[in-house]
Image: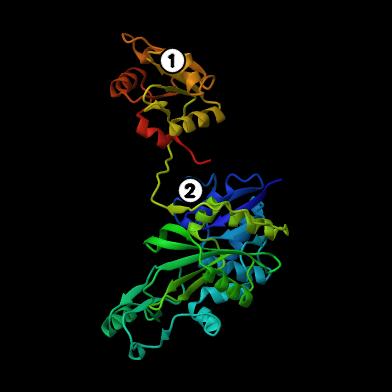
Amino acid sequence: MRKNVLVFPCGSEIGLEIYRSLHLSTHFQVFGGSSVEDHGAFVYKNYIGNFPSVMDPDFVDRINKIVDDQKIDFIIPAHDDVVLKLAQAKADGRLNCELITSDLKTCEIAHSKLKTYEIFKDIIPVPEVYKSSKDIQLFPVFLKPEVGQGTKGTFKAKDKQDVEFYKAKDPSLLILEYLPGKEYTVDCFTTKDGKLLFAEGRERTRILNGISVSSKTVKIRRFNELAEAINNELKFRGVWFFQVKENKEGELVLMEIAPRIAGTMGLVRARGVNLVLMSLFDAMGIDVSVIENSHETIIDRALENTFKHDIKYNHVYLDFDDLVIFEDKVNPAVMAFVYQCINKGIKVHLITRHKAVLDETLAKYHLKGVFDEQILVNDDDHKHRYIKEKDSIFIDDSFAERKAVHDNCHIPVFDSHMVESLLEKF
């Protein structure tokens, strides 16, 4: 029987990466929760809206009701504040399911940059922290929230006036040594026995709105040395990561630690290391191991489109040339939609003016037997005459064909570029 896993908040880049890591697993069924309207509603089939906010006084009680109602076995927190709140509830025995994160003390230290720097200042390099602008000997400096994730709310200050300006806006900002070099994230995994099983670095080559949107794997021995030092000092369980940046001498300096999934962990997942799955299995007491492909990998992320619609249809009439076959190749996006229809029991009718022998062309492209019906239309005939069912949609790259069907059959019509709006998340 598949275990039920709840992700909260599910619509962030972290939550979406957890979904990508789990949604095809035969061992786990994924549920997503959000307290605000976000992209999770377009991705998670088991989506729970109107989720309690982590700031609500009855947050844990309301979480437990969802856990009980949905028979949730595990929660994977996808935000630092949620990590800490649920870790506290778990330590107090107030959480009705298992939690995928490290122990409470580790979560508390990781949640605070000051605590992190205090713990590690004599173990590994950490940035110098200035008490006030009067203590700064070298500019620029970097200001960042004492609690927070990513680069949200951070500032580079070139002089004392800048520091005072930003501190006046947010007195909680830490004043830190500026680190001018390259920035890296090191994705890690610690087993139930406390062994550091995996540590691999990636360079954050492009950052947008505080999120790493482009990253590549980097092999540096120092990453493993730092990971071992951190793992020896704190008690981790499952997935975690830390971030470092080069100072002016090129030395790697610790920026932060987080006992959770990172949104760009899809890079190591693409190489064969699914840290989310491993964490769940480890939490179940199962020994895990790593198989990683050695090829060079770069991940680059941009906004993607996901659609919802209210069209009810049981038949699809689909053109062939320049649609199913485009530039002498099978169009994989169109065929993904065709197989989505097959999975849902929707009949797909191929309707075409194809000049060659259609069966031979279908055989050539390994498409024979895929479609429920093949309709050949003469040049002097009209495709709309062959569409009989009212619960149909029509897909054709020709505007004239679409207009004729739209005007005569009064059904939704789609161009080739519109097929993506019909695709659903698996």
Quickly name the residue at label 1.
Answer: 388
Quadrant of the rendered image containing residue 180:
bottom left
Q: How is the image coloured?
A: rainbow
Image location (x, y in percent) of residue 201: 51, 64
- Residue toward you, 6 or 280: 280
Quickly name the residue at label 2.
Answer: 41
Image location (x, y in percent) of residue 84: 56, 70
| x 42%, y 60%: residue | 212
Image location (x, y in percent) of residue 177: 39, 81
Outermost residue on the bottom side: it is 134
Element assignment for label 2: helix
The answer to whether residue 50 of the structure is visible from this angle is no
The amino acid type, in three-letter code, at marker 1 is: Lys
Using the image, determine if residue 139 lies above or below residue 51. Answer: below
- Taking the image as shown, residue 66 lies to the left or right of residue 371, namely right
| x 64%, y 56%: residue | 290
The amino acid type, in three-letter code, at marker 2 is: Ala
Q: CA distance from mark 2 to mark 1?
A: 35 Å
| x 53%, y 60%: residue | 52
Q: Residues within 10 Å of mark 1 (few under 14, many from 20)?
A: few
